[in-house]
Image: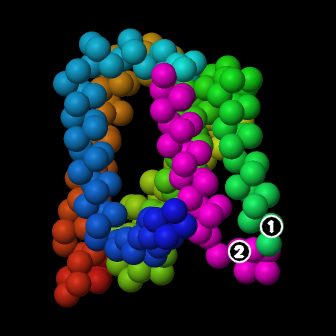
Amino acid sequence: MNEFSDGIYHWLYHGLSLRAVGLALGLLLIAGHVVALLREKHILPWLSTVPRSMNVGTVFLTISFLWALMVATSMDLGEFHQARWLAQFALPLFYVGTLFSANDYLGARALGCFLLLAACPVLDAAFLQPPQSRLLISALAYVWIVAGLFWVGMPYTLRDQIAWLQAKPSRYRAMCVVGIAYGALVLAAALLYYGPGQSQSL
């Protein structure tokens, strides 16, 4: 089990290239926002249910729990390695307690946890890489971190953000267009500047 966890950990935090992350993020941003734009009538009303959704919350909380447990199992803790069992013991308690006791706004809190975990591999892939266009990826990761902190600590902010989008459908469409454009920039940078032998000027 530890070997499986170690393999995933080293691939996720040490094996991802800037090009791979850029391609994946670019494609996901474009595809996700295109679907959101095309299915506006279905997705826009559904968004208001997300912050308190037990289904969304359970899925993302479970993914976050397994991810955090993998990190706690495989991360190099240095001189604190003897305390590893504390994290491995506390995480299941946190998971069960959140799922059954602190489950108000579970969808928002779970999404926040997921974004906080997802930001680290993205930042690791972009760390000290030559092209300045890596900042497209770093900036996105920091947006995830800020949003994640608010959604975990003050989950009603996600409700308010969704209500702001729903107040005027034009805002929703504008955000979808911005997401598609940003994804296209990230994808173009990954194809042109992130690969071996490509120009490092941007």
Residue type, label 1: Ala
Residue 143 is left or right of residue 28, and the answer is right
Dot in front, 1 or 2:
1
Q: Residue at x 48, y 26 (%)?
A: 56
Q: Mark 1 falls on what kind of element?
A: helix
Is residue 86 visible to the viewer in this orientation of the structure?
Answer: yes
Q: Residues within 10 Å of mark 2 (few under 14, many from 20)?
A: few
Give residue 138's position: percent from left, percent from top. 47, 63
Q: Residue at x 44, y 70 (%)?
A: 7
Q: Mark 2 falls on what kind of element?
A: loop
Give residue 27's position: percent from left, percent from top. 23, 51
Residue 155: image tag:
none
In this rendering, is residue 43 above or below 29?
A: above
Report the front residue among 124 and 40. 124
Q: Residue at x 74, y 23 (%)?
A: 101
Q: Which residues are magenta?
A: 55-81
Q: Please check the rendered image and state whether residue 2 is part of the magenta-colored stretch, yes or no.
A: no
Task: Name the residue beneath numbered marker 1.
Answer: 83
Task: Name the residue beneath numbered marker 2.
Answer: 77
Q: Residue at x 70, y 47 (%)?
A: 91
Give residue 177's position: percent from left, percent from top. 27, 36
Report the front residue among 197 and 15. 15
Coloration of the structure image: rainbow
Residue type, label 2: Leu
Q: CA distance from mark 1 to mark 2?
A: 9 Å
Report the front residue among 19 and 188. 19
Q: Is tag 1's residue or tag 2's residue first in the polypeptide sequence? A: 2
Report the front residue among 30 and 5. 5
Q: Quadrant of residue 100?
A: top right
Q: Are marks 1 and 2 in contact (CB under 8 Å)?
A: yes
Q: Quadrant of residue 142?
A: bottom right
